[in-house]
Image: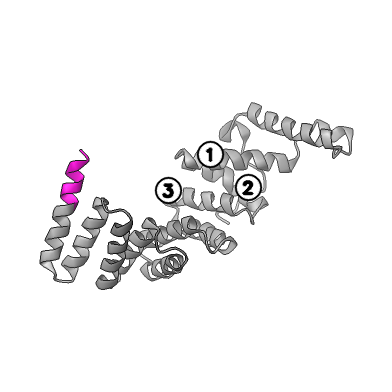
Amino acid sequence: MGKKKNDRLPDIKKAGDSAGLYLHAAMDMAKKLSSGAVSSYRSVFSIERKSEIGYYRSRGISNAKKGRFEDAAELLESVCKETPNDAEAVYYYGASLMKLNRNEEAVEALEAARKLNKRDLRTASTLGMVYINMKAYDKAVSVLEDARGVDANNFSIQYRLGLAYDNISEHAKAIKAFEEALRIKPEAANVYQAMGFAYEQSDDKQNAVQCFKKALELEESTK
């Protein structure tokens, strides 16, 4: 998944502080000591790979949530190689790659995350957006329609589905998706603007103007 690198986890001096890693390992070891799981004297003084991976998983997801996408991607790439069935780690790796405009790698990761949990709307929404960014609109429609079947009350799914339909000239379907998005979030200026373009492409100038005016009003009200 992603670019081929060696199997070593990232350098702790770059990806996180060594004190935090050793503290995490010590706490993990203490739990094992208390449960009698340590089988040798030597293991007490070594950082087990499982504990190391757990530390980098935690740091990687935290970095992704804080917008530190380069650090997150570096940490989570190795984690995902070690634990490819960890849907949450794979999702945040893919989402970080999307933010870094590494779209092909993002698709690979997010498709893997989607296979692990077909009903995860967050993964479907992000994957749909990556396909839109790549102008692979038919693929975006397929992913987002499946997600809408799981939950039709998800704003991001409806909005992004509208964008995808609009870009393949399915303007009536785009408008319907935008209307559903507005049902969920009536004050979304970006949806009114997108719907205005869909109406404009449908040669419905009157509705297009109304949508653009509403979008402007909403934007002005938030200033």
Instruction: Indicate how the structure is coloured in the image.
Output: one colour
Q: Nearer the viewer, mark 3 or mark 1?
A: 1
Magenta span: 215-223
Label 3 sits on what residue type?
Lys
Q: Identify the residue under disc 1.
A: 62
Could you say which is closer to the camera, residue 12 or residue 163? 163
Q: What SS does tag 3 mark?
A: helix
Q: Residue at x 28, y 68 (%)?
A: 176
Is the residue 45 above or below the residue 162 in the image? above
Is the residue 47 above or below the residue 179 in the image? above
Q: Which mark is residue 79?
A: 2
Mark sitting earlier along the chain (1/2): 1
Is the residue 166 above or below the residue 194 in the image? below
Label 3 Cα crowd, 10 Å radius (few <14 / some 14-19 / many 20+):
some
Q: Residue at x 38, y 71 (%)?
A: 138
Estimate the spatial distance between the alpha carbons at disc 3 and disc 1, rounded to whole Å: 15 Å
Locate the C terminus by quadrant: top left
Could you say which is closer to the camera, residue 163 or residue 172? 172
Q: What SS does tag 1 mark?
A: helix
Dominant SS in magenta: helix
Label 1 sits on what residue type?
Ser
Q: How many marks?
A: 3
C-beta proximity under 8 Å, tags 3 and 1: no
